[in-house]
Amino acid sequence: MTPELHSPALLEMRGITKRYPGVVANDGISLQIRAGEIHALLGENGAGKTTLMNVLYGLAAPDEGEILMEGQTIKIASPHDAIERGISMVHQHFMLVPVLSVADNILLGDEPMKNLVFVDRSVASARIRELGASFGWEIDPDRPVGQLSVGWQQRVEILKAIYRNAKVLVLDEPTAVLTPQETKEIFGVLRRLKAEGYAIIFISHKLYEVLEIADTITVIRRGKVVGSRQPAATNEDDLAELMVGREVELTVDRGESHPAGSMLEVEGIFVNDDRGREVVHDVTFEVRAGEIFGIAGVAGNGQDELVGAVTGLRRAHRGTIRLGGDDVTRADPRRLHKMGVGFVPGDRQRFGLVLSFPLSDNLVLNDYYHPPYARGLVRDDDAILRGAEAAIARYDVRTPSATVPSQTLSGGNQQKLIVAREFEGDVRLLVLDQPTRGLDVGSIEFIHRQAIARRDTGVAILLVSAELDEVLELSDRIGVMYRGRIVEILDGRSASREEVGLLMATGGRSSGIQQQIVETGS
Amino acid sequence: MTAQTRVLAAWQRGRAVALVPALSIAVALLIGAMIMILSSPLVSGEFNPTLPVTAYQAMLSGAFGSFDGVVRTLVNATPLVLAGLAVGIGFKAGLFNIGAQGQFLIGALTAAAAGLALNEASPFVAIPLALLAGMLGGLLWGFVPGALKAYTGAHEVVVTIMLNYVALAVLSWAISGPLRGQNVTFARTDDLVAASLPIFLGRDGHIGLLIAAVSVPLASWLLYRSTIGFEIRTTGANPDAARYAGMHPRNLIIFTMSLCGLLAGLAGASQLLGEVGYMTASFSTTVGFDAIAVALLGRAHPVGILFGALLFGAMQAGSGNMQILAGLPVQMVGVLQATILLVLTAEVVIRRIFRVQASGPELVELASVSASYGGKGTG
Amino acid sequence: SSAQIDVGKGLCRVIGDNAAATPAPITASGTSDLKIGVVTDVGTLDDRNFNQYSWEGATGAAASIGAPEPQAIVTQNESQYAANIQSFVDQNYDIIVTVGFAIGAATLEAATANPDIHFIGVDQFQANDPVGNYESLIYSEAQAGYLAGIIAASISKSGEVAGLGGANFIPPVVNYLRGFQNGVASVNADATVHIKYVTDSDLTLAFNDPAGGKSFADQFLAQNTDVDVLFQVAGKTGNGMLQAVEEAGIYGIGVDVDQWASTPDSAECIVTSAEKKLTSSVRTAIEEFAAGTVRDSNQFLGADTEMIGLAPYYQFADLITSEIQGKVDTAFDAMAGGTLDPCAPNACFTGDPDPGT
Amino acid sequence: MDALFDIPIIGLVVQFAVYLFDQFPIVAPIIAAAAVPIVLGALCGFMNERSGVVNIGIEGMMLLAAFTAWWTASLSAQLIPTGPGPLGITPALLIGLACGIGAACLASLLHAWLSISVRADQIISGTIINIFAFGITGYLNLLISQQAPPAAGQFSKFLLPGSITQLPVVGFLVKSFVSVGPIAMTMLIGVIVLQVLLFRSRWGLRTRAVGEHPRAAETVGIDVVRLRYRNVILGGVFAGLAGAYLTIEFGNAFQSGMTNGRGFIALAALIFGRWTPIGAFGAAFLFAASVGLERSIRIAPPTGSLGELLTAVPGQFYGALPYLITIVVLAGVVGRSIPPKAVGLPYEREKTGG
Ligand SMILES: Nc1ncnc2c1ncn2[C@@H]1O[C@H](COP(=O)(O)OP(=O)(O)OP(=O)(O)O)[C@@H](O)[C@H]1O
Ligand SMILES: Nc1ncnc2c1ncn2[C@@H]1O[C@H](COP(=O)(O)OP(=O)(O)OP(=O)(O)O)[C@@H](O)[C@H]1O
Ligand SMILES: [Mg+2]
Ligand SMILES: [Mg+2]
């Protein structure tokens, strides 16, 4: 399995340095990848992994250093050059054009032509179907990508990378949005590609994944390589310490919960998505004060719409939602906020922040209109600033000041900013939608601790996450969502990964054959 | 902090803000000078390298050379400030109000209508009511595209362009029909007597000037100190976040467009009541379009808009002298305005030429303008 | 006679070796230090209309009295009238010509405030006590239109003619067209006269949109296929109408000035133009003032002073028979003598928008 | 039929339908001719905005082209006096056309530089072009009017035998779209070709990708900056054609400010037509047809009770009609037009998505 350690490197990066204003994102990084090797990169948020890959892919010009392929120095000034050299990349954020079809997304940039002008879609579609089939994926090349679930979008990304006959395949956090089952499936694909002689660079924050799939693990901290490990010779704690530079508690101790009366009652609600299709059907559950109720599910199974209904961004067209006994089915976000609902949205940059506004304004985004931040129609800038400075200190938001635009913050700090805003005050219910998506272990630890602390003060917490581990770690009870329904509610302490994973993937506990029936039956 | 360091700090801040615009205007005037010199054979039949000197001197003396000239500059700037705010505040909410022109006309019309109805009344009644009527007229003309955008998604750019033309029709209908004067030889109203704005400064400094002057700090206050302004800016920068934060982007869009209309309507009312004194069916103006340039020149900030309006107002005030003394066609003013805007826009180039450091992330101010034209629309 | 051009109805004719009468070069009759300024109406100086011809009158006068070259300020919107006049006052100008009826109020005000300056208002009228230093020029467009109507009725084969105007609320436009209608009726009581206006509201469309004018006339001619003479009163918009006339191969009649000369691109079809002698009236007013003549404050300019009339016929000279010319001359004399009212039976501008016919 | 006319309300509707049916074939070619510059302007906007660059400078680009085409054609007609060939083509007109297109492309280059390289606000950039074009063409036109060259003439229509243009039912279509001048033909071809290319060609695919998600396009090796530059400058060709159409095909003279808002109407048509060539074409035609209807009611109002009703309405209402129709259709039928996602956003290569 393991490739010859002394076989010559297919790709080598030597002394790569990349500086951004105020940050040295890569500081003399060197890396060697052999054909038939899966090389994992590990590092905290902002460690410089993506930057390094962007340098390799021609998206960022390095300030120093060189790249060699098969021993030859090569120049990569643009993605075009990289593709020419046989380097393909699955990016950390989807690089798919939602309005274009699967086929168009895949062949974009490398279009088969007929009559010199027209894109030959029939040839491409056939090839895509064939390629998909070889991985066991049934792909409809004509579907607009925007209509696919994230899991399928990720598969399209992988097909897109492979379609170009690459030699080097870079995958930047490809599993962040996948279910365990999907991750397994992707790992199968990677192993096959490895066997076919691809050199694969794999980036992930999930230590056990890295340990499972990688042949070599390189850890980067603050732009520098701090160590390299063989999976056999290391473990999660070791890797985490290497990444963060200190000991990390990988699982926060959730302690005992002491649930009281019911806080949120959701009763038989039905919700439509933006296009008017009903995607939440007859969902019923309750969240008690002082407990964390987790909703597990593959992204795109109606969680967004469910959260929308609970937080007032959407209307449930049937059913009722009660908060502390009051009917809030038709309440708007303002009213809910007043009633003590805090909400950490799944898409933090779209909903949670106004990126061009200073931190201070973002911290009062939903409290700007009442004392102490405003008197009548007049904002009290001093109070806002004082409040902001206090919150920044309390939640350890790393920023030069409270007045810089929030777009200058790192992702983890942006999330802490939102947490600082939503967790404060007289909160009775917290809705946490994907609260740690894309964050590193340190930030995750911080946010998990805060959530448990709030639970212990008697707040009801509704946690929605595609991250199965997160749900398992934190929840007192777990509802599994599948195709718009909560198919089962389990006890958080006794549920197993496999059990929940299977429910997420199939909506049932039975084997694959029945799964087929469920799928075709709906 | 001692007084001295405070003055120094203020000077440095002022320098940081004003240096690049000042350099830009200088460069633009140089470019304009080149155009004048190159075209001088067409102006005077011979090559005349001193034409720009004559022209700029004439312009300056017209705009600032006398007390009356200065007042004229201020009077010209008055409707530009108000209409500029009507465009600029729209920008802040992510709305591109090309309709200031129509709102201006309707505001002038409704002010005229009210003024005529109150011609016998005391000025203390007539003036406020006529101004109010102008604001309400403009408000209506802003409300319509706002409401259509909020509830049907109709793009405000299209609707406001169309409403500009509709305004002309309404104006002509009203003036040649119900509002036509008694003893007039063509389609115009009678003179507005009671509602005409008193002159308090020089030859033609009417009190509309004060209204414009007050509107700048008011707009600043509204945008940056009030909670509504915060909502407006949030809606403009990120409508999804606004909804999330419990604001009501639809209502805000309607509110902001109405407010913009109100301001442009007030501009029309003030110009009509303060400068013209009667309304004609052909009441012609370019204020609404100049306002777009002024708002962009001022980066959609009220204080910037004030300066932009003063610049345009001064150029207008000086343009008469430029035509008389340099014999240059009036269109040269447009060429100069475009050049100034161009050089200010390409300020990176100016910074590079003169090695001036950027003072901070100030471009953020406008970032949402053209963005909101496109995919970032509100739902 | 000149060759016909085989386009549309085939009524247009090759221009041949006709040449517009080149005005004699003006020789100065002395020197003068009068400073002359022109404040135009909203628009441009090259509008081939009021602004331009008033301006040319001023330059002509300056040349003939030996005064310095006049200057013009082009008004860009209505609120600037007073300020623009003031600019000349501030520069100590002696004669200020203001153009257009809309600037009348501002002119009157400035004249009252500056008794030492002589004001000449083109197309203006002082209803109340006239001011001594303000001479307003009022033209009888209806008379010119009447003459054009006589020609139109006489040369039309179908008996269906049209007068297209820019906007129906602008007095001179309506006066021209109603005079035209009456002129047609005086020759052929059974003739059909269409009077249509491009717009009721938008002055840009009315006078400044040649492409729109061409579209409008195209459509008019498509929907009224029998019309074979078209008289247009619509500034630059009218220039577009003349192009439509040319494509339709019918007779066109120009307005204000000799459009055969001013819009040479359509000259093949222009039989004549209903002229209002802006240039010479402005020039005369200035020359008379320079000579010290005191004139009435309201100058009514019409057939009696030969300030209206028809332009030459050029290649169509033989189309206008002596019989037709006789009718024209008779009407001209009658109007000069005050015995013929061009505004009857159809009234001229009354203040209300003209609905057309 | 007359019996139908007398039914209350429905009778009026029937009369109106008959009126439209009568007049439309007569007016259609004129509507088509009036729509040409609007469609061409919209195609300019299309090229820009589909690749992510807002263009509100269409008006100015058209005006520049109108002036330049007319002026250079006139100047070269004096140098190369030749009789017109087929379609009225002369070397002078071709030179004029080329220069007009060149001028619009230069303006587009400025727009591209400001929007793409300087990353200025794209609305400012368009505004600059509008103000500048209005100023400089008015300025030069006035200065040269003292020694104005005679016009160079104009392109003429492709003349078909009357038996074809007089065909019942389709004759007016032929007259509207086939029996037209060379620039008008280009318009129709442009619409069809661009519509097909947008959805079927490599260029179209890449353009859409760049307008929606430039970073994704870049990651598959597409040079976003180059594609945007190319499209914006090519867009100038259409603005150039639109301007030249006004001065050397539809008409033969230039007047200051003569585009009279057609560039803005074109922008509206583009948005209205949901950023597709066919949609913009439809929107421009709807607009031109509304103008045609307005004029028709002025020129040849219907008779009977409908006519009485229509003439009772103040004329200004008809003046506003085309604009009102646009608003009503946009708000009532079309609703939200979804722009290309990245339109208006300057693209920075080395920017990570947070
Ligand atoms: N275009 C840029 N401009 C300025 N700074 C940048 C830019 N791109 C990256 N950085 C900075 O470089 C550093 C490395 O970022 P990078 O995205 O490579 O981190 P990463 O290891 O991929 O983190 P994550 O796990 O969050 O994906 C960060 O501090 C980041 O803020
Ligand atoms: N685009 C940017 N513009 C300006 N400053 C930036 C930018 N990106 C990052 N920074 C600065 O770099 C600092 C480090 O950001 P970075 O993304 O490296 O943090 P990080 O290590 O990823 O943190 P986290 O783990 O919370 O994501 C930020 O606090 C910010 O001040
Ligand atoms: Mg980060
Ligand atoms: Mg990364």
Image (cartoon, rainbow, N blue to C red):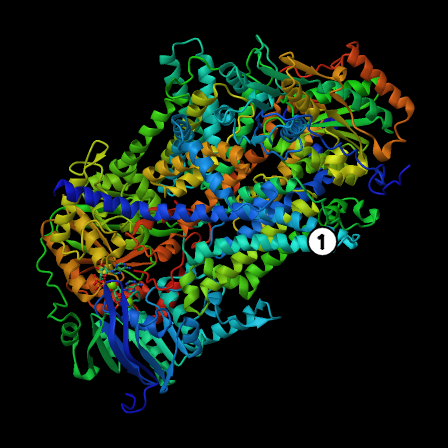
Above or below for A25 versus D161? below
Rendering quarter of residue C319 = top right
Q: Is mark 1 within 8 Å of ligand 1?
A: no
Closest to the observer: C57 or A351? C57
- Write down which quadrant ligand 4 falls in: bottom left
From this view, report whether residue C53 is shown above or below residue D192. Answer: above
Which residue appears at 73% of the width and 19% of the height? C142
Q: Can residue D336 be seen in the rendering of this structure?
A: no
Q: Is disc 1 placed on a helix, strand or loop?
A: helix
Q: Is A289 situated left or right of A508 in this image?
A: left
Q: Chain of mark 1?
A: D
Return the x and y of residue A445 as percentages of the image width and height. 15, 62
Res. D305 image quadrant: top right
Q: Please determine whether, in this image, residue A308 is positioned above or below residue B283.
A: below
The front one of B79 and A111 is B79
**Is C171 left, or right, of A277 in this rendering?**
right
Q: Residue at x 29, y 36 (%)?
A: B220
Q: Where residue D199 appears, x then y in whole percent?
A: 55, 60
Q: Position of residue A126 (x, y in %)?
A: 52, 73
Quadrant placement of the C terminus of chain D:
bottom left
Q: Closer to the camera, A219 or A432?
A: A219
The total of numbered circles placed on residues is 1
Q: Circle 1 sits on which residue?
A: D92
Comparing A33 with A230, the one in front is A33
Residue type, numbered disc 1: Ala
Q: Residues within 10 Å of mark 1 (few under 14, many from 20)?
A: many
- Counting from the top left corner in percent of width and height, residue A371 is at 16, 36
Name the side, left or right, on which A391 lies relative to C249: left
B304 displayed left or right of D187 = left
- Quarter of the image where the N terminus of chain D is located: top right
Whether B1 is drawn above or below C306: the answer is: below
- For residue B199, say whether it is visible: yes
